[in-house]
Image: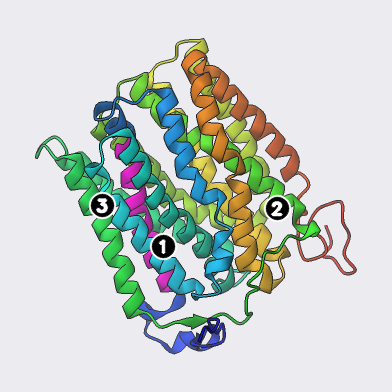
Amino acid sequence: MFTRPDDTAGIPLAKAAALPFWRRPVTLLFVMAAAMPVAFATWSALLNNFVIEVAGFDGSDIGWLHTVREIPGFLAIGVIALLLFLREQVLGLVALFMLGAATAVTAWFPAMGGILTITMLSSIGFHYFETVNQSLQMQWLDKRRAPQMLGWIMAAGSAATLLAYLLIVLTWKRYDLSYNFVYLASGGFTALVALFCYFAYPRFAAPHPQHRHMVLRRRYWLYYAQQFMAGARRQIFVVFAGFMMVERFGFSVDQVTALFMINLVANIIFAPLIGRLVGVFGERMALVIEYSGLTLVFLAYGGIYWFGWGVVVAAVLYVIDNLFFALSLSLKTYFQKIADPQDIAPTAAVAFTINHIAAVFLPAALGYVWLVAPAAVFLLAAAMAMVSVGLACLVPRHPVPGHETILTRPRAVLAE
């Protein structure tokens, strides 16, 4: 007979502190944060070279690939239905395993159809894992320490990925590695870690049982709007900034990976500091700085085509761009502060879907624009970032339930 998973079954978070350190909930968050990007980031680092060298992709093809990749993100709301059958923690680990397994066999499908199919499967794992992982972070981390802890978790993921990239840079040419070997190694590692976490960690019970139906609340409108703009803007960076480095400047696999490594070192150093600064100065300041900086970076990307700036400028912009995105952790803590505790899991799924609305059509559409005017793609991204600045200015200095925007006033609110 079908029974819904019991949110109260398992070890309560309050009692988890008695467990050995390596078996605690926060440790599990760190382990998953380190395992996921080994597969996903390695796939990303090799992707542009793989599809250009093996499948002969052009700008339109890469746009369609990323459109397919983002469909599962648009359907992330399906997580709510799966939570009727699986606990969040279990669903997250199943999705992590799926990401690793699909990444491992990527090179087995070098044609357009095969690449799109395996990309869809790995994307289901990635997006469903990220949806559940963000929910668990907001449920398991204390609000007062969440910004700093999220910074450290981000740094842990960057450190694990840095090690993987370092191995690629040192061994790709020296040992004439194949795409198949690297994908098998990175994806297999992530899949094995997911299996380890499934069997090694107990099931943890959050103090607030989560709703298992779709939640759309009017008072979360600013969070929804920010998610929509963040998804649209992020797609342009993910799809076209890296593609530009290969298509325009001829970067090889080890050069692309080296650029990613610089990003990772910057994240390891600055992500914990960013988390602390968000805790001190608040989400509004962090979001305004992020979006203002991204506006300037995207305009500068356009300058590469308008003024013929060289590879050094492009590489520096790429690193700065990635660093600004580290400030996006403030969007998580903003929602954590305004949300009803029972809304976190279903709203994480809804937010992921909203985040990917533009991602479903934008890469394919802009792929055709890219063929004619690459600078116009980055100009559009700059305009999106400017809209995001305006939305960020509506975030209160001290957001709480009932005071989600500066346009609302709760019955009792902290002094501005």
Give me the residue at 36% from left, 49% from top. 40
Give me the residue at 42% from left, 79% from top. 24
Q: Foreground: 409 or 222?
A: 222
Label 3 sits on a secondary structure element that is helix
Q: Foreground: 339 or 262?
A: 339
Return the x and y of residue 144 as percentages of the image width and height: 62, 69
Label 1 sits on a secondary structure element that is helix
Residue 29 belongs to magenta span: yes
Looking at the image, the residue that sits furthest to the front is 1
Residue 163 visible in this rendered orientation of the protein: no
Q: Which mark is residue 95?
A: 1
Return the x and y of residue 219 as percentages of the image width and height: 80, 58
Query: Do the CB atoms of the residues marked 2 and 1 lie less than 8 Å apart?
Result: no
Return the x and y of residue 243 as percentages of the image width and height: 39, 28
Label 2 sits on a secondary structure element that is helix
- Residue located beneath label 2 in the image: 223
* Kind of residue indicated by mark 1: Ala
Q: CA distance from mark 2 to mark 3?
A: 35 Å
- Residue located beneath label 3 in the image: 104
Return the x and y of residue 394 as percentages of the image width and height: 78, 47
Q: CA distance from mark 2 to mark 1?
A: 25 Å
Instruction: Answer with left or right where residue 183 lies relative to residue 303.
Output: left
Task: Specify the principal SS of the magenta part.
Answer: helix
Residue 104 belongs to magenta span: no
Answer few, some or many: residues within 10 Å of disc 3's Cα (few below 14, many 20 plus, some between 14 and 19).
many
